[in-house]
Every structure is written in structure tokens, then in C-alpha cells.
Amino acid sequence: MGEVIEMARPGPVGNPKTDWIDVPDVPYDGPHPKLPKLPGKQKWFPQVEAWWEQLVQMPHCVLWSPSDWVFAIETAYMKQDWWLEYFGGVVHSTKSTEIRRREDQMGTTVEARRKLRIRYVPAEKAEEKASQQQAAGQGNVVSMQERRRRIAEAG
């Protein structure tokens, strides 16, 4: 008998590895934690505070769960430590690499969001697409206002 050859099968429709996540290009203003107080009289470096203020306004934060916020706070502590070492004249490349990796996972740059397949779209376009998907019965698509309302109620 001949050799059996497995044929490649197409992936599922709506494959999360190939589909883009469209997020309205509107600064996130939903619930999020504040940077925690540091021990003693320590204060957050201004560079970390500025990073946090930019981070919490990223439009795709609407997709984040509580564990994502914990991850972001842990990254803030790492950045605080990095700046402490930097101003002390020491920079550890492994720590720099880990911070960059974590920021990529959070989608803090255009390139990082491209790798995560997240794109910011005009708010009107995102709402229109959600309405079209709901009308077509494609999944549990809800408007961003509805998503934010649910998050606010849960928090």
C-alpha cells in the first residue's frame, strides 16, 4: 500500500492568531489601579509615573483583565528598580531586556501592538463593525460603551 499523506487543514474561522483586534482609538478612561505607595519615604521616579500615566490611557486597556493590571504594576516596580540602578551608575542588560519583553506583552508601542495584532481604528469604524457583526450573529460582540459599562459595574 501507498504512503498516507496528511493534508493541511484550514484553521477555524476567526482564528485569533491571524485576525486583528480592532480597538477604538479613544484613550481608555475606565477603572484601573493607581501606582501603589512605595515603602518608607520612597517616591516613584518621575519617569515611572509618566510611563504609568501613558500606559493607563492606552485604548486597548479596555481589553485588560485584573491580572493584566497586576502584570503592569509588577512592571512598574521593575522600572522603578531599573531607574534606581541607572542613577546609581549601573544598568543590568538582563533587567532591561525583561522590561522590554514585558512592555511588548502589554502592547506599549506600535510595533508591539502589531505583533499582538491589535490595531487602533477610528471609534466610528469600530462601532460600525460591531453593529454589523451583531446583526450577522457573529459571536458575542458588544459595543465599547457596553463593555465599559460592564467593567465599571464589575469593579
Image (spheres, helix red, strand yellow):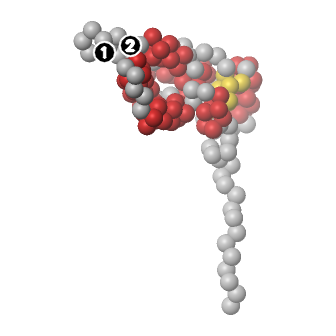
The disc label shown at residue 100, or none: none
- Check the image and name the residue furthest to the top: 41
Q: Quadrant of the C terminus?
A: top left
Disc 2 to disc 1, C-alpha distance: 7 Å
Q: How far from the left and from the top, in percent, is residue 82?
A: 41, 25
Q: Tell me what residue is drawn at x 52 percent, y 20 percent.
A: 55
* Residues tagged 2 and 1 counted as in contact (Cβ below 8 A): yes
Circle 2 is placed at which residue position? 44
- Check the image and name the residue furthest to the bottom: 1
User: Disc 1 on helix, strand or loop?
Assistant: loop
Indicate the amino acid at tag 2: Trp
Instruction: From this view, report whether residue 12 is shown above or below residue 25.
Output: below
Q: Quadrant of residue 121?
A: top right
The residue closer to the viewer here, 34 or 102, is 102
Within-10-Å neighbours for mark 2: few <14, some 14–19, many 20+: some
**Residue 148 visible here:** no
The disc label shown at residue 38, or none: 1
Position of 71 with respect to 109 (left or right) is left
Q: Quadrant of residue 116?
A: top right
Instruction: From this view, report whether residue 1 is shown above or below residue 45.
Output: below
Which circle's residue, 2 or 1, is located before the other in the chain? Answer: 1
**Residue 133 visible here:** yes
Q: Tell me what residue is drawn at x 69 percent, y 62 percent.
A: 9
Q: How far from the left and from the top, in percent, is residue 65?
A: 46, 29
Q: Tell me what residue is drawn at x 45 percent, y 17 percent.
A: 48
Indicate the amino acid at tag 1: Leu
